[in-house]
Amino acid sequence: MINGKRYGWEDISTRLPTGELVDYENIDYSDEKEIEEKYGKGSNPRGYGSGNYKAEAKVTMLREEFQRSIVAYANSTRRTIYTLPPFPITVSYANEDNPTVTDVLRQCKIKKISTSGSQGESDVKVELELAVLGGIRWGSANAN
């Protein structure tokens, strides 16, 4: 029995401050919170302590999209890519069988840019590694 369409790649929309990304192949983001078990008598944890929160993201796009979105944005603000102010990335999942779900990556800063091209490949890709300084708002309906 088929229970409807699940979210897939074609259901993802990703927006930067410059607009919607079109020529991109991947977006990957995650967050984590350090949790450390605290032991006392016996071999099982008696409690826990918590540490730092960390969120990060990677976006792989074609060189043309990188020029159109990131480089043009930096040029329009008269900044270098690494000195751009923190910006949000909004990732929405929507299709006809499921409600729209939006994750907001708040206050992203580009921390690494990698590019590759090789013989036999038909395109050149650019990968951005980002620190997500404001954290990830999972399943949000509001991009602020």
Image (cartoon, grey):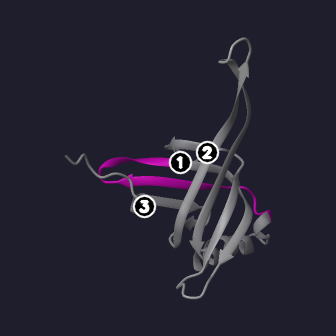
Percent across and percent down for residue 140 are 51, 42
Q: Element at badge 3?
A: helix
* Disc 1 from disc 3: Cα separation: 15 Å
Q: Do the CB atoms of the residues marked 1 and 2 lie less than 8 Å apart?
A: yes
The earlier-in-sequence mark between 2 and 3 is 3
Numbered label attached to residue 136 = 2
Amino acid residing under circle 1: Asp
Q: Position of residue 96 (x, y in %)?
A: 30, 53
Q: Please, is residue 75 above or below residue 50 in the view?
A: below
> Of the residues under marks 1 and 3, which one precedes in the sequence?
3
The residue identified by callout 1 is: 103
Graded by Cα atoms within 10 Å as few (under 14), some (14 to 19) or many (20 or more), the crowding at tag 2 reads: many
* Span shown in magenta: 83-102
Q: Is residue 11 left or right of residue 135?
A: left
Instruction: Please tell me whether mark 2 sits on a helix, a strand or a loop.
Output: strand
Dot 1: few (<14), some (14–19), or many (≥20) neighbours within 10 Å?
A: many
Q: Is residue 97 magenta?
A: yes
As helix, strand or loop, the secondary structure at mark 1 comes to strand
- Asked if residue 21 can be seen in this view, the reply is no
Amino acid at pointer 3:
Trp
Look at discs 2 and 3 and give the one toward the viewer.
3
Q: Which residue, given by chain and number where applicable, does mark 3 sit on?
A: 9
